[in-house]
Image (cartoon, rainbow, N blue to C red):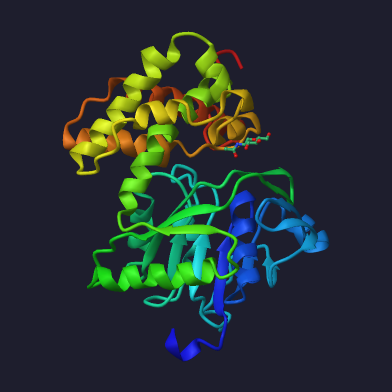
């Protein structure tokens, strides 16, 4: 980017919810990038009134907008637009619900140029992007932000934006050095405002496996039971009988793949949410709103990786099957699956 240092980076944000809005704000307020945000559910509100933001990093703002707000992904080649230097994806990521993130962002990506930054959870999320956009660098963002969108366009950020940023290894890119340099370039733009706390992570999969100890187990268990993580812990035996054994399976799978997690990781993840907060993890929030959950990248992929490397995961599989039932229920409600008519109807 040396020739364009005077020019701001051209950034497309795909998903302007609780994580994306703060990402846009970081980049715009740092002054090294300008953001076009592709919004869906909150498009009208943000277009008309801007965001209302209550943020521990940025303070309280009313009517804030990124440089541009659009309601569909621009087709850069067809519309002869200036190429995007970065596409940041912050939407929910459900490969079982078409169209997929890769399909949706593809028209905005310039082959060999646009760097895709996935600030999304789960395992193997980069594979679908490599397939669709083989010549693009893909970065990994693991966000530890605690933020939510209470009403459309109203973002509340309650803890500092902490992100672990690294580069996925795209086998089509000749050297990993290029990918790592792209990660550092992006970090410079993302943290220029001094507000977010970005840590370069030279082992992107490790950060993901670490977070999966929580996300593959407590997150779906909360959704399945309809209980927040404090109530799961207060309810009796489920933590000892199901959660910890399933977490051990996640840790064993990570280890089999060469990612050694710290010894106290299971205790740390069981107790991650302060008990007096009654925190609802994302899948519980999604299921309560009748939305799809990130079942496949949070639970399905760890189960499949375990099968691939021969680690038995009986507890995790049970959780996965139950989470899939919940997802199937939502699919039926939304008309993505239909069943044959009941006899006599
Ligand atoms: C779920 O929603 C509640 C607000 O209803 C929020 O406090 C909480 O942070 C959300 N959970 C996640 C993981 O975003």
Quarter holding the N terminus?
A: bottom left
Q: Which of the 4 image quadrants contains residue 286?
A: top right
| Front in this rendered view, residue 338 or 6 | 6
Count up the numbered dots. Answer: 0
Quarter holding the C terminus?
A: top right
Left or right for 7, reference 96: right
Residue under the image location 49 percent in, 44 percent down: 97
Q: Look at the picture and state if 194 lies above or below 45.
A: below
Residue under the image location 33 percent in, 59 percent down: 168
Outermost residue on the bottom side: it is 3
| Front in this rendered view, residue 294 or 257 | 257
Outermost residue on the left side: it is 310
Q: Which of the 4 image quadrants contains residue 226?
A: top right
Q: Look at the picture and state if 45 lies above or below 5.
A: above
Left or right for 296, reference 228: left
Q: Look at the picture and state if 24 lies above or below 345.
A: below
Residue 265 position within the rendered picture, expressed as x and y whole percent measured from the top left: 35, 32
Residue 11 position within the rendered picture, expressed as x and y whole percent measured from the top left: 55, 72
Q: Can residue 69 be seen?
A: yes
Residue 234 position within the rendered picture, expressed as x and y whole percent measured from the top left: 54, 13
User: In which of the image's four quarters is ligand 1 placed?
Assistant: top right
């Amino acid at each position: 980017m040396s020739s364009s240092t005077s020019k701001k980076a051209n950034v497309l944000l795909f998903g302007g919810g609780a994580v994306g809005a703060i990402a846009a704000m970081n980049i715009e307020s740092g002054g090294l990038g300008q953001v076009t945000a592709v919004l869906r559910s909150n498009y009208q509100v943000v277009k008309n009134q801007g965001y209302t933001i209550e943020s521990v990093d940025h303070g309280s703002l009313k009517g804030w907008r990124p440089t541009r707000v659009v309601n569909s992904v621009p087709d850069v080649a067809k519309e002869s637009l200036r190429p995007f230097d970065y596409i940041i994806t912050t939407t929910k990521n459900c490969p079982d619900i078409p169209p997929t993130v890769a399909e949706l962002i593809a028209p905005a990506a310039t082959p060999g140029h646009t760097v895709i930054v996935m600030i999304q959870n789960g395992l193997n999320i980069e594979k679908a992007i490599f397939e669709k956009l083989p010549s693009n660098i893909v970065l990994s963002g693991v966000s530890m932000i605690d933020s939510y969108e209470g009403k459309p366009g109203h973002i509340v950020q309650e803890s500092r934006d902490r992100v672990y940023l690294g580069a996925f290894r795209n086998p089509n890119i000749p050297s990993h050095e290029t990918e790592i340099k792209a990660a550092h370039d992006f970090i410079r733009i993302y943290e220029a405002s001094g507000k977010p706390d970005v840590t370069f992570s030279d082992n992107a999969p490790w950060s993901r496996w670490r977070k999966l100890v929580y996300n593959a187990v407590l997150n779906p268990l909360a959704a399945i039971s309809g209980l927040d993580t404090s109530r799961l812990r207060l309810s009796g035996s489920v933590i000892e009988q199901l959660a910890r054994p399933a977490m051990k399976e996640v840790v064993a799978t990570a280890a089999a793949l060469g990612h050694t997690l710290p010894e106290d990781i299971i205790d740390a993840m069981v107790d991650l949410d302060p008990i007096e907060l009654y925190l609802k993890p994302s899948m519980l929030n999604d299921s309560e709103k009748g939305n799809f959950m990130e079942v496949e990248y949070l639970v399905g992929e760890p189960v499949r990786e375990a099968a691939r490397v021969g680690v038995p995961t009986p507890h995790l599989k049970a959780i996965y099957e139950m989470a899939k039932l919940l997802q199937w229920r939502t699919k039926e409600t939304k008309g993505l699956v239909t069943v044959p008519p009941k006899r006599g109807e």
